[in-house]
Image (tube, helix red, strand yellow):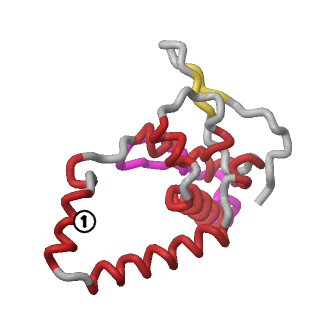
């Protein structure tokens, strides 16, 4: 994968004056936000925690479920986009404590790893097809809406 060695961050400006960084998986600060070893260790730790929870009596498991706010909330598209940017690319954004904390968590690094790997995979599949039929059009559909960052970054890699 080619890396954007220019440290400048590109921004999208909105009518209301808000500027958000454009998620570019080739940017060095995006790469800096991924620590494969820490992520792998966190996954192992999470698996052990789930196994430990399964061994607990049912009433204790219910307490943990009731403590979770997952049932009553969701992760919005903009918040997901923010977490995909990572701590470095989101530096100029005014954030609350929860978002500043989440950006640094290894678990949210999974969003960035998934994004990077998806774009790499899509570009590896599409590039030979595009070279074989350069006259054909390419159209991405993002069913869930969102910012289409995966489509944009796949095109960057192509």
Percent from the top left, x then y, of residue 58? 15, 79
The one nearer the camera, 91 or 130, is 91
Occupied quadrant, residue 6 = top right
10 Å crowding of disc 1: few (<14), some (14-19), many (20+): few
Image side of residue 69 versus residue 40, left or right? left
Residue at the image position 59 percent from the left and 68 percent from the top: 39
Answer yes or no: is residue 125 visible.
no
State which quadrant residue 12 falls in.
Answer: top right
| Magenta stretch encompasses residue 81 | no
The span shown in magenta is 127-150
Q: Nearer the viewer, residue 110 or 96?
A: 96
Q: Measuring 64% from the left and 28% from the top, which residue is drawn there?
A: 92
Q: Between 146 and 99, which is closer to the camera in this rendering?
A: 99
Residue 45 lies left or right of residue 86; in this view the side is left
**Of 139 and 33, which appears nearest the observer?**
33
Residue lying farthest right?
5
**Residue carrying label 1:** 64
Q: Quadrant of the N terminus?
A: bottom right
Farthest residue, direction top: 16
Secondary structure at numbered mark 1: helix
Q: Residue at x 82, y 38 (%)?
A: 7
Residue 64 at x, y percent in the picture: 25, 65
User: How far across and how far down the image is residue 73, in percent?
Assistant: 26, 46
Drawn side of residue 49 relative to residue 22, left or right: left
Query: Would you say 139 lies left or right of 146 here?
Result: right
Q: Is residue 145 magenta?
A: yes
Check the image and name the residue furthest to the bottom. Answer: 55
* Magenta-colored segment: predominant secondary structure: loop
């Amino acid at each position: 994968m080619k890396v954007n060695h220019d440290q400048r961050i590109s921004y999208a400006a909105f009518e209301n004056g808000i500027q958000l960084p454009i998620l570019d998986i080739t940017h060095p600060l995006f790469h800096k936000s991924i620590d494969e070893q820490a992520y792998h260790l966190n996954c192992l730790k999470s698996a052990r925690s789930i196994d430990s929870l399964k061994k607990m009596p049912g009433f204790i498991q219910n307490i943990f479920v009731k403590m979770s706010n997952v049932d009553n909330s969701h992760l919005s598209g903009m918040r997901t986009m923010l977490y995909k940017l990572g701590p470095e690319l989101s530096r100029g954004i005014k954030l609350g404590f929860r978002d500043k904390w989440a950006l640094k968590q290894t678990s949210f690094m999974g969003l960035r790893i998934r994004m990077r790997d998806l774009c790499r995979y899509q570009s590896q599949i599409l590039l030979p097809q595009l070279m074989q039929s350069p006259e054909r059009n390419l159209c991405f559909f993002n069913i869930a809406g969102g910012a289409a960052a995966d489509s944009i970054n796949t095109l960057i890699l192509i």
